Amino acid sequence: MKWLGLAVAALLVTTPASSEIIVATGDLGLVVERASGSLLLVDQSERGAIARIGGLGDLSHASLVYSPDQRYAYVFGRDGGLTKVDIVKKEIEKRILQAGNSIGGAISDDGRLVAVSNYEPGGVRIFDATSLELVLDIPTGSKTIGLVDAPGRRFVFTLWDAGETWIADLSGKDPVVSKIKDMGQNPYDALITGDGRLYITGLFGEDGLTALDLWEPDPKPIRVLPEYGRGQQDLPVYKMPHLEGWARAGREFVLPAVGHHEVLWIDGESLAETGRTPTHGQPVFAMARPDGRQVWVNFAHPLNDTIQVLDTVTKEVVHEFKPGPAVLHMEFSPRGNEVWVSVRDAGKVMIYDTHTFEKTGEIDAESPSGIFFTARAHKLGL
Amino acid sequence: MKWLGLAVAALLVTTPASSEIIVATGDLGLVVERASGSLLLVDQSERGAIARIGGLGDLSHASLVYSPDQRYAYVFGRDGGLTKVDIVKKEIEKRILQAGNSIGGAISDDGRLVAVSNYEPGGVRIFDATSLELVLDIPTGSKTIGLVDAPGRRFVFTLWDAGETWIADLSGKDPVVSKIKDMGQNPYDALITGDGRLYITGLFGEDGLTALDLWEPDPKPIRVLPEYGRGQQDLPVYKMPHLEGWARAGREFVLPAVGHHEVLWIDGESLAETGRTPTHGQPVFAMARPDGRQVWVNFAHPLNDTIQVLDTVTKEVVHEFKPGPAVLHMEFSPRGNEVWVSVRDAGKVMIYDTHTFEKTGEIDAESPSGIFFTARAHKLGL
């Protein structure tokens, strides 16, 4: 081996001053600390915390999205707060109270627009990602859920009361809103597949789910598992499962069953059921490792101290362990070698190797819930 | 709307000094300038160039990968050079000449190991990603091609002369190398699917391709399109197509045909042919937009001034245009709203909206070829 000392030609900029603080943001993340209304900034490679950012209001059920440069997080709080956090400067850049009660948000595929889904007043509000100025207000007269981004500067969301899905297209000069009726009774959550093609809503008021093929010029509701759902439940539903947790594993989806101790497997093309796997408890999240070979499942209270890992080829449980009390969320490293787990009542985020299942680290956190790595900036529908 | 001025509690760090230069790396990229042996650092959001970094040696056929934090690029030059570039400081951090003639590289899923595939001497060398110290030398006695990373700290590569694929597993204390024979005559390139499951080699010495299912405990060669390939060519092969350009669109793959003016469609499960689309010329890259709805195709000399865009539902050409002389490479923004195109003999990188096909920008570059956005850091097999 031969080492070469080569001259560097930096033609367009001069060498930065030594006082510069270098922040590469590709392996950072934010952990929601719901009890204290704060975010813990973490470094995946170092398996450690870098900073705590407070003053975010009510962070129960909070979620967030990232700007394309992975510098800013947009945090959607339950109290209607929309907070733009600069993870390089490690401070809040701007915070507005945009509604009384909100339930998630999304960022457009070009990174220029941030949308928030609101219960009170019901509707979607869309903001300029730089200034947080209101760009468009779409009142729906209904609690609004399941807001996601779709390719082509679109946002898709669903009306709990009216059972409609609306598609807001902001690609042209004037916004265009399309409305799809008959999505079913009381849709409570929704997801979009990673390719932005299928939008699927879970129903609270009737059995089954409803899908839309967004590649169709005029999408029509498609019933999925019409005989399965909460109507048949033989157990109390402690917590409705998160549809964002739907996993795509190879050509199948994995779905946390509602009110049952099992997960369901569904063919990605026909949307027909292909199998069921009995689980430890009522699943909350069923998350696929990025390569789709494993699905990690956590459970509702009172069985929420446990994680089960399923092999997607055999559909069998291949590993089970108890990270600690109140396992609330899991986030995989972008290429899937590790998983980070929020264990709320232990006050810890635990880190595991997904191949050996060994614990590789832990981080103190105040009642941690959602974990969001910056790689989400580059994915559709997250 | 109500604006709140909130106090920020930065508990673990102090506020950075105002002299700080802030660099968030999520929307950056590098353009290979092959004639001058330099890299152009670009900003996707600004649609502009930030810096030029020179001194990288022979960059014909060069490729690169990124560290998980998106701070470092590892550049694989044809001259055997392995260069670690700090895109935050905008300078070369280290450069070694690790072989006489190399042909691509990969980074392990944990970001700790960088592997390089060599013609001369034939084999793979694996380096510590931080120090570039040699960790493992795997001589193969053959020109070595098609090197990719696979989940579980593995590298997969193929021997041109011996027609074998080797899997190096570096997850345990000692490395384990498995060898799969009978991959076919003179494999010239390979790819791994985005889920890390299928490894597919193109053959120069016989018709067809060979696949491996890496989820099998003992993968066996699977013949793909055994009656199709260069053996049947009715046109001179100006340039063997890049298999890295294989596109996954929904459940199908799109493959640039060898020596024909067409692309082939293959079922992602059965690997059987599902269709052919006639094209303007011999395809070089057939790249799927991240949502899989479009495939963009460029062509070999002398028809390399043109791009065709295919719709993956109809398999038909929906758009054709001429960006300029010598279109060498295309790279989509991570969520697919834009595409960047290297037009070598125009000395430009052109930027297009993938929905309207309008040109949204252009950047001067010296004989640009490969374009690599930092979002690649978070993907398997890139």
Image: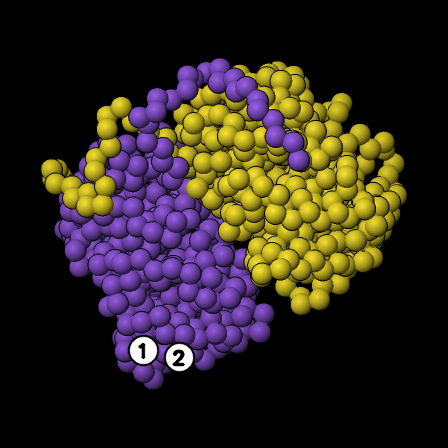
Chain colours: A purple, B yellow
Looking at the image, can residue A94 be seen?
yes
Q: Please give the residue where the numbered disc 1 appears in the rendered image.
A: A303
Compared to A266, does A158 lie above or below? above
Q: Are marks 2 and 1 in contact (CB under 8 Å)?
A: yes
Picture coordinates of residue B74 (x, y %)? Answer: 56, 36
Left or right: B359 in relation to A280: right
Point out the residue furthest to the bottom here: A234
Q: Quadrant of the N terminus of chain A?
A: top right
Q: Nearer the viewer, residue A20 or B218?
A: A20
Q: Please give the residue where the numbered disc 2 appears in the rendered image.
A: A280
Picture coordinates of residue B269 (x, y %)? Answer: 66, 60
Left or right: B260 in relation to A195: right
- The quadrant holding residue A211 is bottom left
Picture coordinates of residue B267 (x, y %)? Answer: 68, 55
| Chain letter of the residue carrying label 1 | A
Looking at the image, can residue B263 be seen?
no
Picture coordinates of residue B182 (x, y %)? Answer: 83, 57
Compared to A314, does A27 lie above or below? above
Q: Residue at x 64, y 24 (%)?
A: B57
